[in-house]
Image (tube, grey):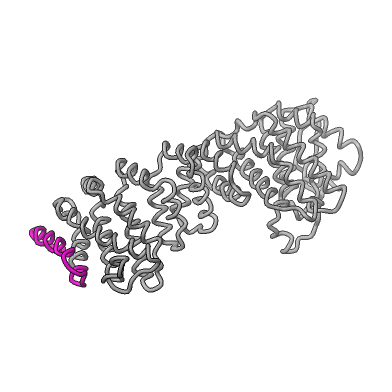
Amino acid sequence: MALCLGNMTELTASINEIIKEEFSLKDLRVLTSLTTALREQEYRDSVPEDVLASLMPVLNRLADEIEAGAGSGEAGAGSGEAGAGGRQAGPLSLQMMAECFRAQRNACIQNTHNQNRLRELGCLELCVRVVGGLSQLNMDSTQAASEAALRCGLQFLGNVAVGNQLCKDHIWNLCFPDKMLALLSLTDSKAVGYASMVLHGCLDQDKLQMMAQQQGGLPLARRVIELCRTHPDLDWTILIATQHFLKSPVLVESMYACMEPLERVTLLQLVSAQLGDDCVITPGVARFLATHFQEDGAAVLSLATASADPQEALVVSSLLDVLCEMTSDHKEFMFLQDQPGLLKTTVELLHRVHQLGKTSRNVFTPTQDFSSSSSSSSSPSISFKAHLVRFIGNLSHHHTHNQNLVRDLEGIPLILDNCSIDSNNPFISQWVFFTLRNLLEQNPENQEVVAALERRGPADDSALLNLGFQLEERDGSLLLKRVNKDEGND
């Protein structure tokens, strides 16, 4: 340990001497010794309050210098006078500020008592004030020192909030929403990462409600989602979105309503990524997304025109992808089978997309161009028909009402008509087989529809065989049977 416990009084006196003179490297070494000592749990647990309190006059003086620098639009080269503007923060002052924050940061590690003492001393207010000043400095000559001080201040705010609800609430009240938004908009990506850590530490269900309902909350939430898109390496923003935002249907709905298309796509990608074993998505969010697919699905039809803006269609395609995943082996979302109008919308959209592809040559027209440029296209039309077919199959699985509804909407011949090879819809034949199996299972009426199509002539029979199956009558019922394609064509 760099500082023995018996030297605490001497250390406090040394820190108190700092504000009586110009800053020097000796003063910086005093602060560094405190930072080093506070790395040790024994020292953190026994540090007297007057040691922590002795930092406050130093921090206040440094804060005045930083604000003078921010007010004049630059950071001075030294720590001396700057005319009428007062002292300005030079490199040494900024290094000392960073060291003060490091000491406070270390004091908070696994120590609720120190967290509370620092909050009661007013350190949180002062830190927020300093961080705001640092973010406004013109850092041409002192950029490294300014960035270090800013980052250390944010680390302190992050540490003081860990496991301490009083500190979390205090920081939230000091920063929400404008100051937090400003911190998440800094150009220093590391500082943004630490600011995201602070926000993550403060959030709870009540604060999510505030973000959804209070002015300024939604721009802050949207900024987090934007960072998820532009800075995917910032883990804290991903955690904010997945561990907090997606658990709040109210916030998701409020965000979605005011988002631009690319923001919505990012949000939907985050939703899709969470559809695993430890899914955090609530039924309310699933229901909301299904409703928007019903309302906005027709936007994808604009892709048939050369002048179409693909962004709205990309949102629809992303919604469909998410809904397909939700209804694939996720029992908690199978209530979507009973979502009013959802299956009807999906079948009708498949009708319209398929018809567009037949009436003119466009992105919905089947093609067999398997060149890399075609298969890797990012157009929202890629796999859209295949996913519509898949979604119909998911919604019909073990659901007699939906099986019958697809038949009533003339969806069975429509689905069979999409079994041909199409490089714009890879694996569509497999999804047709999957969906047809779900539609025919224990449903004699649907089996008879397919049998009637088969009896119409070689073209329909060929379509069935190309899928690798045929219908077989057994004991008065029609069964779907896999066949070898070569044998079936003989």
Left/right placement of residue 285 relative to residue 475 reads: left
Q: Residue furthest right?
A: 457
Identify which residue, 206 or 237, lies in the foreground: 206
420 or 136, nearer to the observer = 136
Q: Is residue 474 visible?
A: no
Magenta segment boundaries in residue numbering: 1-29
Q: Quadrant of residue 321?
A: top right
Q: Is residue 425 magenta?
A: no
Q: Is residue 189 left or right of residue 450?
A: left
Location of residue 379 in the rendering, given as x and y in whole percent from the top left corner = 71, 55
Above/below status of 440 relative to 148: above
Residue furthest to the front: 84
- Which of 432 and 220 lies nearest the eye of the viewer? 220
Q: Position of residue 150 (x, y in %)?
A: 35, 61
Q: Position of residue 350 (x, y in %)?
A: 77, 41
Quarter of the image holding residue 3? bottom left
Residue drawn at point x = 79 percent, y = 55 percent: 306
- Which image quadrant for residue 29? bottom left
Q: Quadrant of the N terminus?
A: bottom left
In reply to whether residue 15 is colored magenta, the answer given is yes
Q: Is residue 94 above or below residue 350?
A: below
Residue 356, position in %: x, y?
83, 46
